[in-house]
Image (cartoon, grey):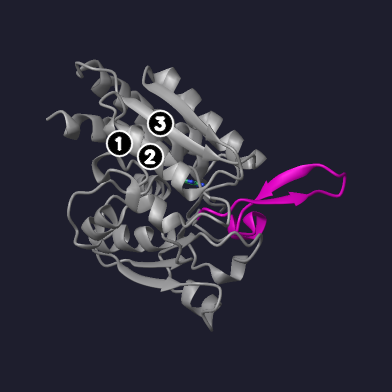
Amino acid sequence: MTANILDGHVHAQILIDSIETELDRLSHVPGLAVVLVGDDPASHVYVQSKVRMAGRLGLRGEVELLPHDASEAELLAVIATLNARDDVDGILVQLPLPAHIDALRVMAAVDPSKDVDGLHALNAGRLFHGDDALVPCTPLGCLRLIKSIRPDLTGCHAVVIGSSNIVGKPMAALLLKEQATVTQTHIHTSGIADICRQADILVSAVGKAGLVRGDWIKPQAIVIDVGTTRVKTADGRTTLRGDVLFDEAVQVAGAITPVPRGVGPMTIACLMENTVKAAKARRA
Ligand code: GUN
């Protein structure tokens, strides 16, 4: 028997429908500002998708574009302006930033009440305290997918591969909050295959195509693949590959996300959810 395939578009649409209902009850239109520095083509595509979805939902979406050589001071000035604007409820600074800019300093400059990426230390700290917080969109989307299959995670063993601030660490914190037993691993973890084989829930977020083989997976586990690595196919096309070797894993897992059409659409839907949450909290 092959795994249940978790279609990110289907689950994202369920979330979008519920956000639309919530928007009908709001007396003002939430505003989302996305800041993009430089001309990385993949980042431009991601930002367009975010702003397009905001428009589809009737949110006010805008992009602040800065050139690749913009200084950190210029970026901080843009953020200060967005922090001060009453019509902006959510601010997202697209990552990665050019190497000459200190990303942590930039995250710290975003008003925590508008931090729809959940990357400000205050929101990260609240999440680790189990308090209500704006939570990074990708792990939030992953948790929704996991809970669509297994609503109660109490006592199950979750293994997270990856320890980034944007996915790995908040993912582990969210799973811990759900009473799962969490093992955080990364590419330097020794015996990683054996650890993964114990996972009822396996989330991989390292960006290493094909890292997770079928024999790393416990039968019937829920497997969430956050990796998106661009690779060239034999006929010269560019395609996206996940961290998980899908064709092998689908034979063993109970449920699995594909790449693409898995986690990606959930990230965007959760960004919309965070923007509405921020807008409601700021005006409560
Ligand atoms: N780059 C890739 N994913 C993300 C994300 O979720 N947030 C931000 N700010 N940048 C990203």
**Other-residue count near label 2 (Cα within 10 Å), few / some / many at <14 / 14–19 / ≥20:** many
Question: Where does residue 102 sit, x and y in percent of width and height?
Answer: 47, 57
Q: Is residue 215 above or below residue 151?
A: below
> 228 or 175: nearer the eye?
228
Of callouts 3 and 1, which one flags the residue occurring earlier in the amino acid sequence? 3
Query: Magenta residues, as a range?
Result: 225-251
Name the quadrant containing residue 125.
bottom left
Of callouts 3 and 2, which one flags the residue occurring earlier in the amino acid sequence? 3
Question: Where does residue 194 sit, x and y in percent of width and height?
Answer: 51, 79
Residue under circle 3?
A: 33
- Figure disc tally: 3
Residue at x-position 66% and y-position 39%:
41
Residue at x-position 39% and y-position 56%:
105
> 102 or 173: nearer the eye?
102
User: Quick one: SS at disc 3?
Assistant: strand
Residue contact between numbered discs 2 and 1, judged by CB atoms under 8 Å: yes
Q: Amino acid at mark 2?
A: Ile
Marks 3 and 2, how far apart in space?
Answer: 10 Å
**Other-residue count near label 3 (Cα within 10 Å), few / some / many at <14 / 14–19 / ≥20:** many
Residue under circle 2?
A: 79
Is any atom of residue 23 visible in this view? Answer: yes
Q: Is residue 65 above or below residue 181?
A: above
Name the quadrant containing residue 267.
top left
Q: Amino acid at mark 1?
A: Asn
